[in-house]
Each structure stands twice: as structure tokens, then as C-alpha cells.
Image (tube, helix red, strand yellow):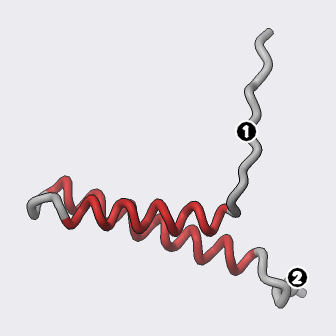
Amino acid sequence: MQERRRFKQIDPLDKRLSEEAERLRKEARGTPPGVERAKLIRRARLAETGSHISEWLSSPGLKAPT
């Protein structure tokens, strides 16, 4: 059985997602209007939302539900 290759992530998840969102938005700017551009913008929004959620979950002020 093969072992999984593990990667040590240097940057936190929220930073990586923010960078991915920025890269996707930049790519969308160079794409003509249409389905492909809409897909890129949607993926950028999803990455940005994931970044905000990750940031929120790791915040020190987060309280457990009661």
C-alpha cells in the first residue's frame, strides 16, 4: 500500500484562499464576457467566502454554541 505524500502548508488557509480569489479575478478581467468569465468570477467569490469563514473560525472571539 502506498503512503500519502504530505505537504506542510506555509501560509494559513485564509491567506491562500484570498490569493486564489485575487488570481481568479485577475484572470476573469482578461477573459471576454461569457460563461467562462462567469465561472471564474463565481470561483473567486467562493474562495473569498471560504477565506472569510476560515478567518472567522480561527478568530479568538469565537464562542461555542450554548
Mark earlier in primary sequence (1, 2) = 1
x then y, percent, for residue 44: 39, 65
Query: Where's the C terminus, which quadrant?
Result: bottom right
Q: Which residue lies furthest to the top in this view?
A: 1
Residue 49 in the figure: left or right of residue 27 = right
Q: Are marks 1 and 2 in contact (CB under 8 Å)?
A: no
Depth check: give the residue in front, 9 or 61: 9
Question: Which image quadrant for residue 56?
Answer: bottom right
- Seen in the image, is 48 located left or right of residue 11? left
Residue 11 falls in image quadrant: bottom right
Please tell me the numbered disc located at residue 24. none
Q: What element carries label 1?
A: loop
Residue located at (86% from left, 87% from top): 63
Real-space Cα separation, disc 1 to disc 2, in angstroms: 30 Å
Where residue 24 sits in the image (x, y, percent)? 35, 60
Q: Residue at x 88, y 82 (%)?
A: 64
Q: Where is residue 61 in the image (x, y as percent from the top left)?
A: 83, 90
**Residue at the spot of label 2:** 64
Q: Which residue is drawn at 66% across and 62% down?
A: 13
The location of residue 14, given as percent across then percent down, is 63, 68
Three-letter residue code for mark 1: Phe
Q: Mark 1 points at which residue?
A: 7
Q: In front here: 46 or 5?
A: 5
Residue at the (77%, 13%) spot, across then down: 2
- The quadrant of the image that shows the N terminus is top right
Q: How crowded is mark 2: few (under 14 residues within 10 Å), some or many (20 or more)?
A: few
